[in-house]
Image (tube, rainbow, N blue to C red):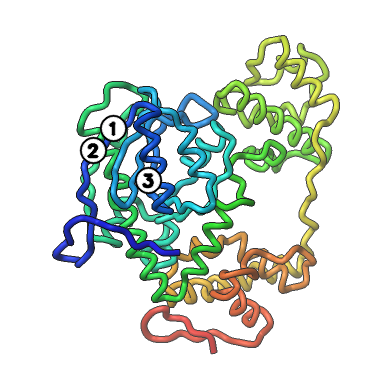
């Protein structure tokens, strides 16, 4: 995919062409129509949102900033601009959306408009693959990619309040003003490093057709703190309770914790009360008698939720192997990532490493993520060679300080 754009005067320090266009403020459908058409004809655009998310299940989209190769605009839904046409662009696989750390923005569009994102290009991920560091803020990513320094002072703005000041409008527009230029620069760097395919694979995994942009209610139990204390049967009840809480919070558009807190949900699964009076005895439950209480008790009575597959008990010898070998595997991972200039947190977590060691030791578990796609190419095969005794490690002078022998 190409990231060439038409920009304003060149930056003398970098030789880059950066946009110097005025900010348009769009507050109605008629004004939005032309912007959407231009974005579609260009085949790509930069987009960001300002939202509030403290008191709702779905982020409330208060402002949408868009930059095309020739235009820069803030779209104001609070003032009357519809967002449906933008949601359609988000879902269009023929149009590239350049964003920075877009998970929350995409969740907002998915929940409000039911769209699945397509062709999302994440500047933060690209920076990680380009060797600029993992989880970079927008300010740091722009500074390293195109030498632009943003001067932001509106980080705690309540974007739902109107009117917006000129400073707030400028702040919001700056979030997308340089994204296309930064994408050009990073894509060129990825090309030189031979990592365009790696970045594309990871972006598709996180934001593509099969990505889980919105929480699956049937998997919500995995995010419940304290679930590890539950026994079989009780955990099945938690699966059902967490799914009910997720769907009900989404229906009412309130945070899940406002409905039932995690600790209370776990206690309900443990006690499994049969009546409203028994449920009211569970500390922290604030539901009043009525439809919600009846539904909650029905979930408990029916055991609505299948017992999750539990990880098979790992033999003591394999557990000891993991404990001893983990530092060596971590050293290989860190050395490989340092040599490639990729942040290790993009590649694997401690759990990923432990799963790989168990898999190589014959645990019978599914193939871990480290042994597929670009992760295997970068570090997975090296780890398998280490774990099978085909290579040893030696300390060397200078980065990455460890080499495979």
x and y percent of residue 384 in the render?
A: 65, 78
Which is nearer the eye, 1 or 37?
Answer: 37
Q: Residue furthest top?
A: 289
Measuring from the top left, give residue 144's x and y in whole percent.
28, 61
Q: Which residue is mark 2?
A: 170
Q: Which residue sits at x=45%, y=32%?
A: 83
For the point 69% across and 82% down, the residue is: 388
Percent across and percent down for residue 185 are: 32, 65
Q: Secondary structure at mark 2?
A: helix
| Disc 2 packing (10 Å; few <14; some 14–19; many ≥20) | some
Q: Are marks 3 and 2 in contact (CB under 8 Å)?
A: no
Outermost residue, bottom side: 405
- What crowding class fits label 1: few (fewer than 14 Cα within 10 Å), some (14-19), or many (20 or more)? some
Q: Upstream in the sequence, badge 3 or badge 2? A: 3
Q: Quadrant of the N terminus?
A: bottom left
Task: Please provide percent x and percent y for residue 300.
Answer: 80, 26
- Up/down of 40 relative to 345, above or below: above
Tell me the distance, in whole angstroms, between the alpha carbons under discs 3 and 1. 16 Å
Q: Residue furthest right?
A: 302
| Camera-side residue of 394 and 25 | 25
> Is the C-beta separation of discs 3 and 1 under 8 Å?
no
Q: CA distance from mark 1 to mark 2?
A: 11 Å
Q: What residue is at 49 percent from the left and 61 percent from the top?
A: 345
Q: Is residue 225 above or below residue 134?
A: above
Q: Is residue 141 left or right of residue 165?
A: right
Pointer 3 local density, CA inside 10 Å: few below 14, some 14–19, many at least 20: some
Residue identifier under label 3:
38
Left or right: 324 with respect to 27? right
Q: Sequence order check: which comes first, mark 3 or mark 1?
A: 1
């Amino acid at each position: 995919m190409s990231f060439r754009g038409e920009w304003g005067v060149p930056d003398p320090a970098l030789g880059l062409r950066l946009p110097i266009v005025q900010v348009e403020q769009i507050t109605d459908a008629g004004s939005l129509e032309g912007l959407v058409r231009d974005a579609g004809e260009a085949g790509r655009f930069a987009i960001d949102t300002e939202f509030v998310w403290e008191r709702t299940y779905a982020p409330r989209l208060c402002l949408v900033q868009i930059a095309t190769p020739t235009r820069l605009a803030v779209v104001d839904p609070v003032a009357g601009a519809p967002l449906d046409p933008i949601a359609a662009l988000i879902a269009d696989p023929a149009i590239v959306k350049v964003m920075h750390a877009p998970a929350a923005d995409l969740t907002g569009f998915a929940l409000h408009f039911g769209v699945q994102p397509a062709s999302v290009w994440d500047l933060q991920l690209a920076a990680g693959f380009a060797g600029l560091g993992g989880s970079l803020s927008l300010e740091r990513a722009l500074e390293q990619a195109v030498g632009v320094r943003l001067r932001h002072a509106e980080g705690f703005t309540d974007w739902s309040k109107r009117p917006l000041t000129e400073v707030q409008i400028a702040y919001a527009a700056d979030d997308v003003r340089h994204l296309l230029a930064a994408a050009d620069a990073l894509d060129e760097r990825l090309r030189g490093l031979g990592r365009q395919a790696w970045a594309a694979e990871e972006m598709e995994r996180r934001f593509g057709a099969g990505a889980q942009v919105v929480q699956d209610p049937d998997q919500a139990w995995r995010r419940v703190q304290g679930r590890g204390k539950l026994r079989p049967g009780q955990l099945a009840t938690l699966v059902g309770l967490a799914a009910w809480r997720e769907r009900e919070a989404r229906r009412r558009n309130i945070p899940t914790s406002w409905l039932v807190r995690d600790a209370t949900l776990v206690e309900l699964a443990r006690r499994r009360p049969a009546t409203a009076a028994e449920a009211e005895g569970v500390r922290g439950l604030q539901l009043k008698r009525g439809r919600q209480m009846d539904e909650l008790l029905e979930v408990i009575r029916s055991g609505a939720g299948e017992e999750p597959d539990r990880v098979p008990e790992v033999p003591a010898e394999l557990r000891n192997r993991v404990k001893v070998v983990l530092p060596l595997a971590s050293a290989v991972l860190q050395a490989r990532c340092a040599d490639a200039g990729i942040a290790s947190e993009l590649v694997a977590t401690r759990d990923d490493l432990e799963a790989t060691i168990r898999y190589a030791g014959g645990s019978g578990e599914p193939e871990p993520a480290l042994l597929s796609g670009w992760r295997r190419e970068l570090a997975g095969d090296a780890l398998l060679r280490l774990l099978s005794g085909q290579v040893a490690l030696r300390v060397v002078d200078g980065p990455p300080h460890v080499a495979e022998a």
